[in-house]
Amino acid sequence: TLREYIQHGVSNFVVQALLITVRSKEQTSKMVKCLTGIVEDGSILKVKTIQSDGGDGGEKGPAKKNNHRMGIVWRAFEMCANKGSSQDQEQILSALLRGFASITTSPEDNGANDGEKSEDKKRRKRSKAKGLSAGECIPHLLGLTPGSCEGESDGHRLTLDAAGARALYHVFHFKERLRSDWVKGVLHIYGQADFVSIANDGLGSRCIMDGLLDGPSRSKTSKLLVSKLSDRILYLATARVGHHTIEKLFRALPTMEDKASFSAELSHSLNQLGSNAMGRSVMATCAVKEYLEGESAWKDVLAKQRDKAGWLEEITGEKEGSDEEDEEVKTKKRKRDKKEKKRKRRRGSE
């Protein structure tokens, strides 16, 4: 069965390859129907403890935790984001929320009396039927507890669940009504120190920050992230990985006023930005020096950047935009179509 293939140590990669090669909405719907039952019982979400081999001495090393088949979850979300309908996306999301609810144990079980235990069982049954909220599910998916980066040094290594982070990236590209709770959840539960660590981590920057700043919710999330990062923006602007997030944050800001205030903030720290290649790259992207020269010079640089981005989009045929931008494009297209129909009618009457 599909469940047995997924649970097998080798054949689960065959299932992942199958999910990657799905090419139509009909195929996606069939795969989602097969996967929802497997995901929502939590069997592929459970953290499996394995014993490491001690080497030549024959003694077993300390136990390690191994996420059980999270690659299937990642590929399923990728499939739904690329080829799935909103119904498919909703089904796989609900299955994931119920799956994490089914494997989450309550810490109140220890030392509780019979009455409390029975009450807690009822509460967990209700939770299992409905599923966890997006905010409760995100730390399980990423393997990152909110506040865990508080008090850590700037260079400490962040550990994220790779498949979970990639799955979250695709959730950020779901339909607006489905992804909104997840976007709000990430921005709400994680603090400044967490976001600085995520932005300065290769996987976190590529999956979480890019998902927020390159995805369709970027107009809303960019302004919230500016206030969230606030006094740590300069540190990230000169960091090896973090400066990419600062550049994308600037591009994602929706209005010229927001971009002007961002450039103005960076213009107070020219010496620090010019101290390394990353800072100089941020200065060029955010037109910091041109901002000091005057408004017209600053706007000219941004206009050139937009033209260059539009030229690349024409070549690649890809366009990343927000919901507001997509709706504006659709409105213009409808107006052009109406005008074209009127012209044809006039020609036909003549």
Image (tube, rainbow, N blue to C red):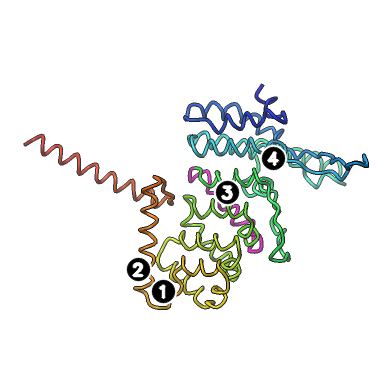
Q: Which residues are magenta?
A: 175-195
C-alpha distance separating marks 1 and 2 = 9 Å
> Whole-percent x and y of residue 49?
81, 40
Q: Quadrant of the C terminus?
A: top left
Between disc 3 and disc 2, whose residue precedes? 3
Spatial CA distance of label 2 from label 4 is 53 Å
Q: Nearer the viewer, mark 1 or mark 4?
A: 1
Amino acid under label 3? Trp
Estimate the x, y position of residue 161 in percent, counting from the top left: 68, 47
Q: Earlier in the sequence, mark 1 or mark 4?
A: 4
Q: What's the residue at 61%, 39% (across, down)?
A: 74
Depth check: 228 or 51 in front? 51
Q: CA distance from mark 4 to mark 3?
A: 16 Å
Front position in the image: 37 or 128: 37
Which residue type carries mark 4?
Answer: Ala
Q: Is disc 1 surrounded by few (<14), some (14 to 19) or many (20+) residues within 10 Å? A: many
- In which quadrant is the N terminus drawn? top right
Label at residue 182:
3
The answer to whether mark 2 and mark 4 are in CB contact below 8 A is no
Please indicate whether residue 21 sits to the left or right of residue 189 in the image.
Answer: left
